[in-house]
Amino acid sequence: MIGALKSEWLKLATTKMMWIMLALVVLLMLLGSVMFGLFFHFLSNEMAAAGASESIFHDPEIPPVLWTGGHTMARIPALILGAMAMGGEYRHKTLIDSYLAVPRRYTVVGAKALMVFLVGLVMGALGSLAGYLASMPFLLMNDAPLLLDEGSTWQTLALSALSMGLWALLGMGFGILVR
């Protein structure tokens, strides 16, 4: 199984598309967080002009929205990466070589599924980190806490990363069904 995992990592890491999708996920998470941050910043300014006593950024439900603002858009590249991981095997006829090297089909597909999930998880972790870092200036400008000491912050970021891994795995399932 270790050999099959190494082989699948090599297949993914040597394609430009994986790195492009990784950069796209990070960029989309960053842009989504900035867009939500600007929206809430302008909304907070309007509320302050209307006489509100506290910024909207002090609402405990707003920071998670900022951190994961681009998650909806960033799922698409993860889904595409998973579909291309399996579809590329059919297109370039490399699946035959994999089955010749590792004769058990479940080992090959299991290694590919595990590697696609792990790459999606890393994509999600980096995207979540980018979203969190992009939201920090908006929180600091409005004297809102960064919430690094709360477990719900880490839970939100971890679930965002896990979700991205599952979307990549779902894309692999589409790649298996649609050649």
Image: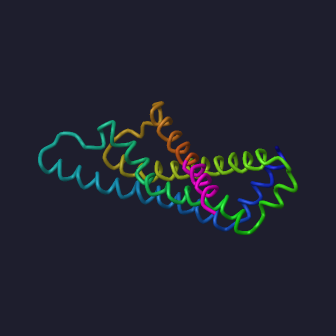
In the image, residue 47 lies in the stretch drawn in magenta: no
Residue positioned most to the right: 101
In the rendered image, which quarter is residue 60 located in?
top left
Q: Quadrant of the N terminus?
A: top right
Residue positioned most to the left: 50
Tell how many labels: 0
Say which of 56 and 22 sits in front: 22
Q: Quadrant of the C terminus?
A: bottom right
In the rendered image, which quarter is residue 85 located in?
bottom right
Say which of 99 and 144 sits in front: 99
- The spot of residue 70 in percent (x, y) is 43, 54
- The spot of residue 83 in percent (x, y) is 60, 59
Say which of 128 and 75 sits in front: 75
Q: Which residues are magenta?
A: 167-179
- In the image, what residue occupies the spot 82% across and 46% down? 104
Position of residue 48 in the picture relative to residue 131 (left or right): left
- In the image, what residue occupies the spot 21% across and 52% down? 45
Magenta stretch, main secondary structure, is helix
- In the image, what residue occupies the spot 73% across and 49% down? 109
Q: How is the image coloured?
A: rainbow
Position of residue 20 in the picture relative to residue 115 (left or right): left
- The spot of residue 65 in percent (x, y) is 37, 45
Say which of 47 and 64 sits in front: 64
164, above or below 91, in the image:
above
- The spot of residue 123 in percent (x, y) is 59, 52
In the image, residue 175 lies in the stretch drawn in magenta: yes
